[in-house]
Amino acid sequence: MPKITVLGYGTYEVEPGKKLVLALEDNGVNILHRCGGKAKCTTCRIEVLDGDCFDLTNIERVTFTEKGLVDDYLRLSCQIRVNSDITIRPIMTKENSGLDPGPRPAD
């Protein structure tokens, strides 16, 4: 099983192919996902510190461009399927933003 290491939270085993945003939420990381996992709001963005999350999807590229976010290590956790070990840092959480996470994204 792949493992996700979340800076400041811990390391968790994740079933292969699970959306990262759901894996984070299921393991107690209150990452925001204000648009419900539709890659529109960018609140579920994470910084990839180690591991392979593959290249940005087209929807991520468009959304990041529209929001003026340019960073080679940013990804949207709602667009990543966990298939190998990764280390990440969540950017926006309930605790550091004071916001409600949003509706649970679909599987």
Image (cartoon, grey):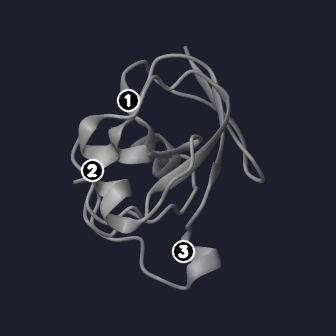
Give neighbour class at mark 3: few <14, some 14-19, many 20+ (Cα, 10 Å). Answer: some
Mark 1 lies on a secondary structure that is: strand
- What is the number of the mark on residue 53? none
Image coordinates for residue 46, horizontal then vertical, percent: 55, 50
Q: Is residue 29 above or below residue 101?
A: above
Give neighbour class at mark 1: few <14, some 14-19, many 20+ (Cα, 10 Å). Answer: some
**Earlier sequence position, callout 2 versus callout 1:** 1
Residue 41 or residue 68, whichever sits in front = 68
Q: Quadrant of the N terminus?
A: top right
| Mark 1 residue type | Lys
Contact check, label 2 and label 3, Cβ < 8 Å = no
* Residue 103 shown left or right of residue 7 in the figure: left
Q: CA distance from mark 2 to mark 3?
A: 25 Å
Q: Quadrant of the C terminus?
A: top left
Mark 3 lies on a secondary structure that is: helix
Image coordinates for residue 14, horizontal then vertical, percent: 51, 27
Image coordinates for residue 73, horizontal then vertical, percent: 59, 41
Residue lying farthest to the right in this orientation: 8
| Mark 3 residue type | Lys
Name the residue that disc number 1 marks. 18
Residue, x 52% and y 47% (percent of image)? 24
* Residue 21 shown left or right of residue 91 in the figure: left
| Mark 2 residue type | Val
**Earlier sequence position, callout 2 versus callout 3:** 2
Contact check, label 1 and label 3, Cβ < 8 Å = no
Name the residue that disc number 3 marks. 94
Q: Is residue 84 above or below residue 37?
A: above
Q: Is residue 71 above or below residue 87?
A: below
Residue, x 46% and y 17% (percent of image)? 83
Q: Quadrant of residue 81?
A: top left
Disc 2 versus disc 1: nearer the observer: 2
